[in-house]
Image (cartoon, rainbow, N blue to C red):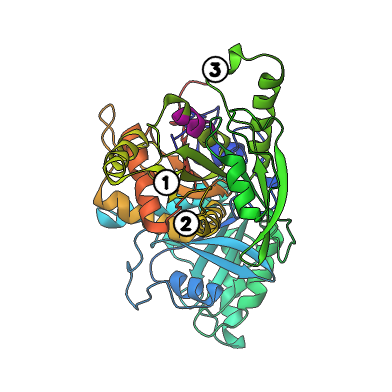
Amino acid sequence: METDVRDVTGDYGDEAGWIEAHIAEFDDDGAALEEEPDSGPLPVVAVVGRPNVGKSTLVNRIIGRREAVVEDVPGVTRDRVTYEGTWRGRRFTLVDTGGWDPDATGMALRIAEQAQVAVELADVILFVVDATVGVTDADETVAAVLRRSGKPLVLAANKVDDQRMELEAASLWSLGLGEPQPVSALHGRSSGDLLDILLNIMPEAPPQRFGVERGPRRIALVGKPNVGKSSLLNKLAGEERVLVDPMAGTTRDPVDELIELGGKPWRFVDTAGIRRRERVLQGADFYAGMRTKAALERSEVAVVLIDASDVLTEQDLRIISMVIESGRSMVVAFNKWDLVDEDRRYYLEREIDRQLVRVPWALRVNISAKTGRHVDRLVPAIERALDSWSTRVPTARLNTFLAELVAATPPPVRSGKQPKILFATQASTEPPKFVLFTSGFLEEPYRRFIERRIREEWGFAGSPVEVTMRIREKRGAPKRK
């Protein structure tokens, strides 16, 4: 699917205001993501602090598994690393950062800069201090920066392994960040209390739907007139459910039929053939085309039927484009395969590769609605397309994948500067939409490259994938009206 690019930099001088203003505006129709019960970015908690205070150990304790690399030397963590955490049924994204040393130079300076970016993109900050050492000059400098951020903050006094150490933790009041919360990342002491406090101040995550009953999946059969849509529906049903006639245009109204296949019910919608130019259609043909489009919008997957015995036409390609624009998952069924001889199959394969270059992700099946040849392959293809359409990539995995991808193949330089991908999230499913928060404009070939690599990593066979950008406004840039 062609990527959508919208420069939405607004009147905000930093990433924090920019993220807060635009994080809920990913949908093309302008609807906030919070209105979708199963989509939207999770709340982000940034774990920051000077080197070797136990941030990664605390991250492992919170997520309940040893994923963050831990070693008793400073500087083990360098990049912003994201993980998905859950506590009391609520999900959130946890960002582990490298040690934040205000006086750092070289590599340590770049590590500190990443920690600052994590703060700017976070909803909540978890500031970790070593209670056994007490307040250092670096802690005080970082605390001053965090106060200016205005973000909700929890001060964690780490390495409080027993009650005696709680008295040492009290000295952290001097940072001016509120009550220190004693915790032992190594032993887990009071980690649950710390998480309770975090939940109380973080924004609500999009609710999850567990065990929600949904009706039969809806499949629209679309294509130009007389390609065999009604014949296919009858073959799937095992009886003549809809009228079939050699005359093109027999079907006018979308016909819904509930058919059980593979032990589950499916709702197939036989639609009117989409003609060449709807602007010249009149009367019943015009309204039939409008109803076909409406039926497509109500469906979850479109089976595009193409006459394999004929050459691919502009009309076929226009129908495929209409399905892409609708955001439905797609299976391309080459019907009348029983009429295709060996020579025609050879050239047809090359026609398909050449003319369907926009949709290499579409699943293909070769069938004959008349004889029933390979019709049984249609439902597995539909199921695979629907699974892809509903796939959600965890934020942590997505950001780790993109970090490795960008490190291996950086974005091209634009106007003398190389844009960076600051953060990424999957904004929604059905269809999958990914949002890249960037420091600059990413060229279209590079966005297509990212989409292709996302498909290689997670599949998405049979489903469109949309990749959009949110470009951070430069500090001090003139306001746009």
* Residues at discs 3 and 2 in contact (Cβ within 8 Å): no
The residue that appears at 60% across and 77% down in the rendered structure is 191
Is residue 8 shown above or below 405?
Answer: above
In the image, which residues are magenta?
Answer: 316-322
Q: From the image, tell me which residue sits under label 2.
A: 374
Q: From the image, tell me which residue sits under label 1.
A: 337
Give coordinates of residue 104: x percent, y percent. Answer: 31, 55
* Residues at discs 1 and 2 in contact (Cβ within 8 Å): yes
The residue that appears at 39% across and 62% down in the rendered structure is 99
SS assignment at label 2? loop
> Does the segment drawn in magenta span residue 232?
no
Position of residue 421 in the picture relative to residue 381 (left or right): left
Determine crowd level at label 2: few under 14, some 14-19, many 20+ residues with C-alpha closer than 10 A: few
Is residue 31 shown above or below 361?
Answer: above
Q: From the image, tell me which residue sits under label 3.
A: 277
Determine crowd level at label 3: few under 14, some 14-19, many 20+ residues with C-alpha closer than 10 A: few
Position of the C terminus, as image quadrant, is top right
Give coordinates of residue 387: x percent, y percent. Answer: 54, 57
